[in-house]
Amino acid sequence: MTDSLGDWKRTHYSQELDEDMDTESVTLMGWVHEIRDLGGIIFVLLRDRNGITQITAPSKKITPELLEQIRKFKKESVIAVKGTVQGSPKAPGGVEIIPTEVKVLNESKQPLPLDPTEKVRAEIDTRLDSRYLDLRKHSISAIFKIKSAMLHSVRIYLEEKGFMEVNTPKLVGSATEGGTELFPITYFEREAFLGQSPQLYKQMMMATGLDKVFEIAPIFRAEEHDTMRHLNEVISIDAEMAFADQEDAMNLLEKLVHNAIKEVKENCQAELEDLGVELEVPELPFPRLEYDEVIDIVNSRGVSLSHGEDLSRAAEKALGEAMDGYYFITNWPSEIKPFYVMPHEDAPEKSYAFDLMYRDLEISSGATRVHQHDLLVEQIKSKGLNPDSFQRYLAAFEYGMPPHAGWGLGAERFTMCITGMKNIRETVLFPRDRRRLTP
Ligand code: ATP
Ligand code: MG
């Protein structure tokens, strides 16, 4: 039997209670975190969004009916409690509530697939299967409050810098970079794909005269990775700016990253504490390493890698040991970067591409883009792709395409850097990986 909400309204969250409210009447709503029945007195911990409050029910102070009602509480049921605040130095938050009336709004089945009191540390798969329960832990929801604060900061920052938020299609007719790694879907009588990047669309936006655009949206990668830093659906923070080059793009990116970390540190103190994270705001500007220097560093640390190769995982790890914090890798070989990346004019084997790294983790890739139609066609061909399949995209470069640059920053990888999470799955509510498509 459960009770209806009726005209009850929550008056406070746990965190809003303090000793100064002694004798005040309050209504709390939340979950039964724990229940301890000592016969003559029952202690219930009520957990809500931000905190935990102790409900103390001594048989001397409350009616036998009320005591019986409380005794029947089950762990993780949803309850509402009306009562009086009483200062109590030993209770969490320094107060306890002496109940006058209670309701069970929804009863939880027992046993629980997962214990939100964290007494038993569950495996990540068990946790993800019951994510709704997992997220009741404040140390887990903290990750998402921080992610939300980071995204908020990024959005405001870009808007303040004159960027307009846009939405580009996620159902696409052909491959962005021509490669594999796309999820094919059935689009009526045709084949289509899930977008792997807004790249071609944000470039076409550069031909509209709107100059600065950004998008925060999912990208889909059909890579069969099974790593701690890859998922098949992630949120990409993409920015593209006209009349700008890679230096402008890097300057914008490092300031945006710096600002987001600063704001998370200022606004998410409780969440960082829940996670046990001492967040350091990185100094500006971030170091810039040339790709060639990176190869030397990696080689000097005993990982063999020749000039021209993409960084292997071992190379990233070696680099991460040499470099603390955030840094850029610039001047990548054109060969291992996509066709839309601008080659150096005098040495076309090098490109104006950059990656932003945090220790051993790539968090962003960006570049000055090719804005000249004929060069772009040439580059598409040199990557073994067919310019015909890029017809509509290429046309945008024939009627006044300004020079432009931009980047894509992985929201989950950036969240990993801020929260200290080692597994990217921790930073997505409902992650999608090679094996997981539900919940
Ligand atoms: P990696 O080499 O680490 O697989 P990438 O170079 O293929 O990454 P990009 O195409 O450059 O990735 O995408 C830009 C950013 O988007 C990356 O730096 C990363 O932050 C994020 N990203 C891309 N693919 C993934 C993925 N599968 N899982 C998590 N984040 C990703
Ligand atoms: Mg990249």
Image (tube, rainbow, N blue to C red):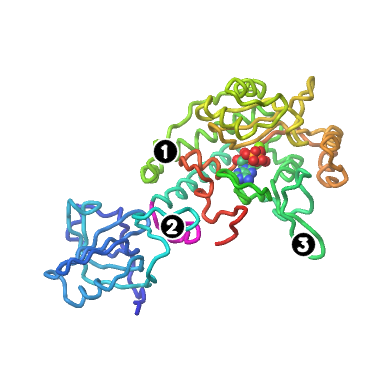
Count of numbered labels shown in the rendering? 3
Report the side of 414 relative to 239 (left or right).
left
N-terminal of the pair, mark 2 or mark 3, is 2
Q: Is residue 428 above or below residue 47?
A: above
Quick check: 175 left or right of 241? right
Of labels 2 and 1, earlier in sequence is 2
Q: Name the residue beneath numbered marker 3.
A: 187
Asked if residue 100 is positioned above or below residue 183 in the image, the reply reads below
Amino acid under disc 1: Lys
Residue 134 image label: 2
Kind of element beneath mark 1? helix
Q: Residue 291: where, in percent of width, then height?
A: 66, 24
Residue 163 seen in render:
no
Q: Amino acid at mark 3?
A: Tyr
Q: Is residue 129 magenta?
A: yes
**Does dot 2 land on a helix, a strand or a loop?**
helix
In this view of the protein, can residue 258 be seen by the observer? yes
